Amino acid sequence: MATRLYVGNLPFSATEEELRSVFGEFGTVEQVELVMDRATGRPRGFGFVQMDQAGATAAIEKLDGTQMGGRSINVNVAMERTERAPRPRRNNNW
């Protein structure tokens, strides 16, 4: 079963190919996703890597806190996104 990893504090110049190469040293990388800002299309400095469980464990141990592009990256198991409560509607009542 694959494990989804959160990779934070990435340099804005990081590419999916670069992450695939770095994490590929620890196991089979199934998917890489860099999160982009919707408005500007620029990277937001974090992403996700999905890989085999043994490789994910090794990647967390070896890569968390290491330097990438001059920044200390954070690597841990991604948490499932929780359901957000709907925002209350504003009726512009002053």
Image (spheres, helix red, strand yellow):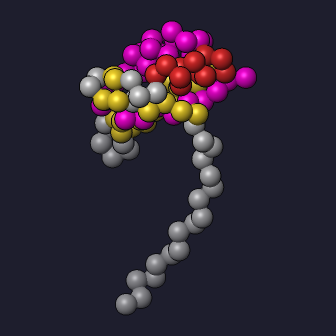
Front position in the image: 2 or 89: 2
> In which quadrant of the rendered image does the N terminus lie?
top right
Residue 60, percent from left and from top: 53, 25
Q: Is residue 28 above or below residue 92?
A: above
Q: Is residue 2 magenta?
A: yes
* Location of residue 27 (image quadrant): top right
How many marks are shown on the rendered structure? 0
> What is the span of residues highlighted in magenta in the rendered image?
1-30
State the residue at coordinates (59%, 59%): 84
Residue 80, percent from left and from top: 63, 43
* Location of residue 36 (image quadrant): top left
> In which quadrant of the rendered image does the C terminus lie?
bottom left
Residue 50 visible in this rendered orientation of the protein: yes
Residue 45, percent from left and from top: 36, 36
Q: Is residue 66 above or below residue 83?
A: above
State the residue at coordinates (44%, 14%): 22
